Structure formats: structure tokens, C-alpha cells
Amino acid sequence: MSWLFGIKGPKGEGAGPPLSLPPAQPGAEGGGDRGAGDRPAPKDKWSNFDPTGLERAAKAARELEHSRHAKEALSLAQMQEQTLQLEQQSKLKEYEAAVEQLKSEQIRVQAEERRKTLSEETRQHQARAQYQDKLARQRYEDQLKQQQLLNEENLRKQEESVQKQEAMRRATVEREMELRHKNEMLRVEAEARARAKAERENADIIREQIRLKAAEHRQTILESIRTAGTLFGEGFRTFVTDWDKVTATVAGLTLLAVGVYSAKNATSVAGRYIEARLGKPSLVRETSRITVLEALRHPVQVSRRLLSKPQDALEGVVLSPSLEARVRDIAIATRNTKKNHSLYRNILMYGPPGTGKTLFAKKLALHSGMDYAIMTGGDVAPMGRDGVTAMHKVFDWASTSRRGLLLFVDEADAFLRKRATEKISEDLRATLNAFLHRTGQHSSKFMLVLASNQPEQFDWAVNDRIDEMVRFDLPQREERERLVRMYFDKYVLKPATEGKQPWRMPPRMGSSLRP
């Protein structure tokens, strides 16, 4: 491998001329006897060069040149050189990547610092703005306080001025009234003196006039009495002596008394009949019974109601499955009772408010082909003495229904309380007795349905008149889901498909949504 050192020779020949060594330093010979500290340091850069390494390299190159593996060694050296170059390039690229990463990191750090600087500046601006706003509000509040103090001072001064003016006006009025009172007293005193003097002077004449007026009045009254007695005596004598006139007078008076009594009773009977047939009692708040006045006011609705078919008793009513089965049995039994003209059974429905008692009562009446009437127990106590008459009117009116009447009494415990333990008034006790008298026996004209939140307050006689008790509990999760679904189908989805405005939820939908 002489080519490594720039020496060319034919193939197979020995090594070229030997490498020249650096020249020896002057004074190197014969200087061995002097110590190192006696001679100065060599100034030539080749003075400390060790040629043994080059000699070994030259020897290895000659051996390698004469070896048969010279080309492989050259290729290996070239490959090693390329590998080193690739490693250097990869390191250079890694260095460049690291530099780029450092630059990006520096940019990110600068951006982060800039963002923090901006946020800090923004916060400072906000704090400064808030402080300025606080100062402005404080200045405005101080101005308002000063203005308020100024207004109060002006108002106080005005009030003092008004009070002074009022005091002066009051003093002036009092002085005027005092002067006027003195003048009036002087005038009255003068008039009284003048009148007393005139009366003293004319006392005899006044007494004579009074005496003459009294005598004339007495004579006039005596003459009137005498004339009236004479006329009455002659008329009575003439009437008594004429028996035809006496008979006619007695008959006329008798017929007049009979006519007045008959007209009074007939008017009372006719009024009760008209009230029972055409109107409704005052205790009934709502009824499906058609009256003549209602038919004249709403003929279309009345005709639709008359032509409508019986509805299902549980249509639109959401109840638990067990309660639905029980009330359906009651509805079927009531309808069969109506068809067979049998005696109706009285029912008590109790439970929390808003669980569908009133709605089921209406549906039961419509399903059975009956009319319904709704009254409230709280309306009975305020009627006082008229409660007994009103209660009898309700049952008389119910007995005149041709289709049969379902009388629903809501909040029945308000007047059907225990008579032995509860403190109730005499009027309410009399009304309760009238109710018990009219419901003592089952009727084929009306069906009694009571609703209460506290059935334990009923009188024992009321409990004897109840044939069946049904408890309405609050709806569970399934019933509430059905309620919500029914509401959306009826009041949201259906109006939306028909292009109408969706309705709001009615106050009562047959069951309560409370937990």
C-alpha cells in the first residue's frame, strides 16, 4: 500500500525509496552531557516527532501490498470510510434536527412567554379598568350622596318654610275665627235681647192666640168624630138589616181567603217543579243533565251529547292494573244495574287528591248511560239554616232524572263527620240528618258516590250506607310514563300534525304526577 504515502512502483517490486526524516536539530550532537535544564526547549515542530509509527505503518503497507487480499482491504477501507461519512452525515442531520427542535422549542417558549405577557397585560388592563370603574362608581356614588344631602337640605328648608307659612296661616285663620265668633256672639245676644223684650211686651196677645187655636182644633176634631160615627152607624145598620148583602160579603171574603191560600201553595208547588225539571240546585256545581236553558243556549252541543255513544269507563283514565280491574268490574255492574232497573250501590272512593276519583266518576256515569252531578262538601257548612232545604232540593232534583243520576260528593268528610266526637254546629248536624234520611234506602233513581281524603272521619251511619270502598293510590313509574305519553299524544303531537297551537297541560289528567 505504497500508494497510501504517495509512492508508486511496479507490481511485485519492493518498497520505494525510504521516507526522508526530518533534519536533525543543530547542536543535537555532543549535547548529551548537558542536562535538560541547561539547554533551551527546541523551537522546531519536528523536533519531538517519533518516526517509529510511520515506519510500522510503511512496513504494514508493504506487507499488505504484497498480500493477495489488498483489494479486499481497500474495499473494506473504502466501506469503512463511507460508513464513517454516513455516520457523520447522520450525526449532522441529528444535529440539524436537534437544532430545529431547539428552534421550535425556542419559538414555542417565546410564544408561551408572549401569551403570558399578553394575558398579564390583559389582566393588568382589566384590573386597571376595574379600578377605574370602581373609582368612577365611587365618584358617582359620592356625587349622588352629595346631591341627596343637598336635596334633603333643600327639602328641609322647604318644609320649614311651609311650616312657617302654615303656622302663620293657621294663626290668621284662628284670629279671624275668634273675631267672627265674637261678632256672632254679640249679634246673637242682641237678637235674643230684642226677642225677649218683644215677647215680654206681647205676652198677653200670644197667650190669647194660642188659646183660640187650641179651642178651634178641639172643636174640629169633635165634629169629625161625630160625623164619622153617624155615617158608620147608619151604614152598619143598613148592612145588618139587608141579609143579601151580609151573605154576599161573607161569601166574597171566604172565596178571597181560599184563593190566596190556593195561589200561594200552587205557586210553591209549581216553583219546586220548575226548579226540579228545568234548573239545578245551588249545591250542584257541575252536571251533565240537559236543561231547557242549556238546550236553548247550546243546541249543537246538546244534540251531540244526545247522539253520542256510551264511552269506556277507563278511557283517558290512567290507573294501576289491579285498580283498573276493580273499577272495571264496578262499571260493568253499574251498567247492568241501569239496564235491569235495579237498585244502585253506593261507593266510597278515598285516597290522596288528584288521583282520578272525579274523572272516573264522570266516566262511570257516561259509560252506564246516566247523568252525573258534582257537589262539594265544603259548600254545605256556609249555607247555615238553608242547608237542610238545599239538601232536600238536591235529592228531589236527582229523583226526577229519567236516565238515572250519579251524585258525586267531593270532599264529603267536610259535612259527614262524626256527630258524637266532632264539634259541629246545629245547622250542620241538621243537614247531616237530612242527608242520612234521604239516603237511608237504596234508590233506582240515583247512585251515591262519595270521595274523601280522610274516610276515618265519617259518621258511623254514613259508613252503613256505603256498599263498596275503593282506594285510589298515587301512580307509580309505569302509570306516570303512560300519563306523559298520553299528554304528548293528545296535546303536543296531535295539534302539531293538525297545524294547531299546542295546548298547555290541563290542571288534572286523571292522575297525579307528584312523587
Image (tube, helix red, strand yellow):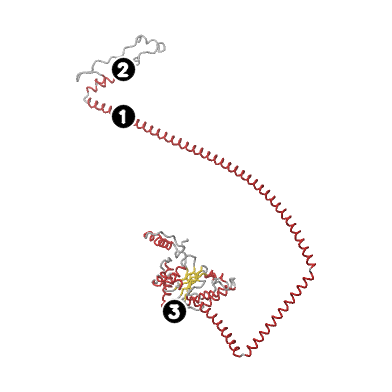
Amino acid found under the numbered disc labelled 3: Ser
Compare residues 429 and 55 and report the one nearer the observer.
429
Q: Earlier in the sequence, mark 3 or mark 1?
A: 1
Q: Residue 26: percent from the left, percent from the top?
A: 34, 9
Q: Quadrant of residue 212?
A: bottom right
Compare residues 58 and 515 and report the one nearer the observer.
515
Q: Earlier in the sequence, mark 2 or mark 3?
A: 2
Q: Quadrant of residue 389?
A: bottom right
Query: Compared with residue 248, is residue 68 higher up or lower down, i.e. above or below?
Result: above
* Disc 3 to disc 1: CB gap under 8 Å: no
- Mark 2 or 3: in front is 3
Circle 1 residue? 89
Amino acid found under the numbered disc labelled 1: Gln
Tag 2's secondary structure? loop
- Mark 3 or 1: in front is 3
Circle 2 residue? 51
Amino acid found under the numbered disc labelled 2: Pro
Q: Residue 56: percent from the left, percent from the top?
A: 29, 20
Circle 3 residue? 342
* Disc 2 to disc 3: CB gap under 8 Å: no
Compare residues 278 and 98 and report the one nearer the observer.
278
Q: Quadrant of residue 97?
A: top left
Q: Residue 383: percent from the left, percent from the top?
A: 56, 71
Q: How far separated are the C-alphas under marks 1 and 2? A: 34 Å
Q: How far separated are the C-alphas under marks 2 and 3? A: 144 Å
